[in-house]
């Protein structure tokens, strides 16, 4: 197939795609402004010209750049009547807002942040179409290299055109992954590991208006006891000292958060250390792992991902109710309870209750302190709140709460309806044995002839 080419001078630095042509010629930004236009001998061709190939840095909004693209029919009829043509930005590149297109024709144009759709009327009136698109390009984190847009449509073979060069995002990393702290329940000022943030390139921590760095534990019941120390350990980065704060009740999903802002960006890679971190816990937390969330617009590589600004979620604390257990937490043998008798048997060993079990509404009730000796629950893991009339019991990863007069029991975060609850007799708090053993996962057998109950805590 014979191909023709024309060369002309223009007023812009242009990178042109000419369809349908297999060879695409790009003008260098340091050379005279030249537009290369080609079409085949059948007389069909369209030019897509980019005014300047910007170099973008992934994840940096200040690296965004205005790009102008011209679409021009080189020969009338290239845009077939009643058809559509689509111009698409590559994955990882988008405009800050819907692409703006100017034209003076009977075309119908639809745009998004990443596409231009051109609808050609069935009875086209224009001799040749020409459109100009303007967009401010930004690059997402995780993309780099030459980025090519695509134009395609009926009668127009799919072609790519260079739209931008993307430099990889500057990275901030944790110098080391801290070993999670072993935390106790109901204790303030528990030492937690330092956080050490290192820029791999200068300027990774950004100063952008009100942008900040924030970290918090996304749970109710675990929080910072006080404001930690935040300082630049290496490099020339500057932290705004007035921005370092402990924000109380910032969000219902967590208790408090530590935040700070950058006063001056670095000219050499810098390191920030967060030290003297003290954590507090309440007594309602179940066993398990607890994570620290770190986020903020200041993290340049966290920008423009369109998903989450959390740059990291790391394991930061562990709670194990069995830590530091006493002999009361050791494995228990089979237990025999007899209604009306203040003694019970663990295996062949006779033991005493603070009061005898009794029957109420066809249920056996036992004093709360029974669970300390018989079921291996530490005494400080059974709490009675006289004001709230609330009993709270901790066992392994379970948190059980019963309130006097309520027909609901809480098991961790679940609410379970019950037919009977807390009772009080002879000044002691008592609970239905069947309910508690079911919640604690203790197997039991009932002898209907004697009324005795056999428990197997192990």
Image (tube, rainbow, N blue to C red):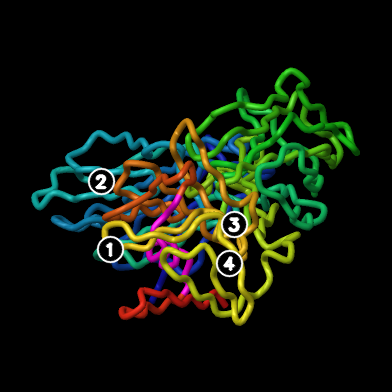
The residue mark sitting in front, 2 or 3, is 3
Spatial separation of the CA atoms under disc 4 and disc 1: 22 Å
**For residue 195: magenta?**
no
The label on residue 362 is 1
Task: Give x and y (percent) for residue 274.
Answer: 80, 38
- Highlighted magenta segment, given as a residue range: 430-442
The residue mark sitting in front, 4 or 3, is 4
Few, some or many residues within 10 Å of mark 3 (<14, 14–19, 20+):
some
Q: Reading the chain from its start, which is encountered first: label 2 or label 1?
A: 2
Of the pair 286 and 207, the residue shown nearer to us? 286
Q: Reading the chain from its start, which is encountered first: label 4 or label 2?
A: 2
Quarter location, residue 100: top left
Residue under pointer 2: 128
The secondary structure type at the circle numbered 1 is loop
Q: Reading the chain from its start, which is encountered first: label 4 or label 3?
A: 3
The label on residue 143 is 3
Residue under pointer 4: 374
Q: Is residue 327 left or right of residue 403?
A: right
Task: Give x and y (percent) for residue 127.
Answer: 21, 45
Task: Give x and y (percent) for residue 264.
Answer: 78, 26
């Amino acid at each position: 197939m014979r191909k023709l080419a024309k060369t002309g001078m223009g007023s812009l630095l242009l990178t042109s795609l000419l369809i349908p042509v297999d060879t695409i010629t790009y003008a260098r930004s340091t050379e005279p402004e030249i537009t290369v236009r080609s079409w085949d001998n059948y007389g069909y061709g369209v030019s897509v010209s980019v005014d300047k190939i910007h170099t973008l840095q992934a994840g940096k909004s200040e690296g965004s750049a205005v790009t102008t693209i011209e679409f021009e029919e080189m020969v009338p009829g290239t845009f077939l009547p009643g058809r559509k043509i689509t111009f698409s930005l590559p994955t990882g590149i988008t405009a800050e807002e819907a692409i703006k297109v100017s034209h003076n024709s009977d075309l119908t144009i639809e745009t998004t942040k990443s596409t231009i759709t051109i609808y050609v009327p069935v009875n086209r009136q224009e001799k040749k179409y020409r459109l100009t698109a303007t967009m401010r390009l930004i690059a997402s984190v995780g993309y780099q290299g030459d980025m090519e847009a695509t134009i395609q449509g009926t009668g127009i073979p799919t072609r790519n055109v260079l739209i931008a060069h993307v430099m990889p995002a500057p990275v901030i990393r944790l110098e080391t992954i801290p070993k999670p702290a072993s935390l106790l329940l109901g204790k303030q000022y528990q030492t937690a590991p330092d956080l050490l943030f290192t820029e791999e390139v200068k300027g990774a921590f950004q100063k952008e208006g009100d942008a900040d760095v924030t970290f918090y534990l996304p749970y109710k019941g675990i929080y910072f006891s006080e404001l930690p120390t935040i300082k630049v350990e290496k490099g020339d980065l500057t932290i705004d000292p007035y921005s370092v704060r402990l924000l109380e009740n910032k969000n219902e999903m967590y208790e408090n958060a530590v935040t700070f802002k950058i006063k001056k960006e670095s000219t050499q890679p810098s390191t920030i250390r967060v030290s003297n971190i003290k954590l507090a816990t309440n007594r309602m937390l179940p066993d398990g792992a607890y994570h620290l969330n770190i986020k903020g617009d200041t993290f340049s590589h966290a920008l423009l991902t369109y998903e989450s600004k959390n740059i990291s979620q790391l394991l930061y604390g562990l709670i194990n109710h069995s830590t530091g257990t006493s002999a009361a937490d050791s494995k228990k043998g089979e237990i025999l309870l007899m209604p009306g008798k203040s003694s019970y048997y663990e295996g062949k060993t006779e033991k005493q209750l603070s009061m005898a079990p009794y029957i109420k509404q066809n249920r056996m009730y036992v004093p709360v302190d029974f669970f300390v000796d018989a079921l291996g629950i530490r005494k400080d893991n059974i709490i009675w709140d006289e004001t709230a009339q609330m009993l709270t019991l901790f066992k392994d990863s379970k948190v059980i709460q019963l309130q006097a007069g309520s027909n609901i029991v809480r098991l961790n975060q679940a609410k379970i309806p019950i037919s009977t609850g807390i009772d009080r007799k002879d000044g002691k708090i008592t609970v239905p044995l069947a309910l508690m053993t079911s919640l604690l996962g203790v197997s039991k057998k009932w002898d209907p002839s004697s009324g005795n109950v056999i428990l197997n805590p192990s």
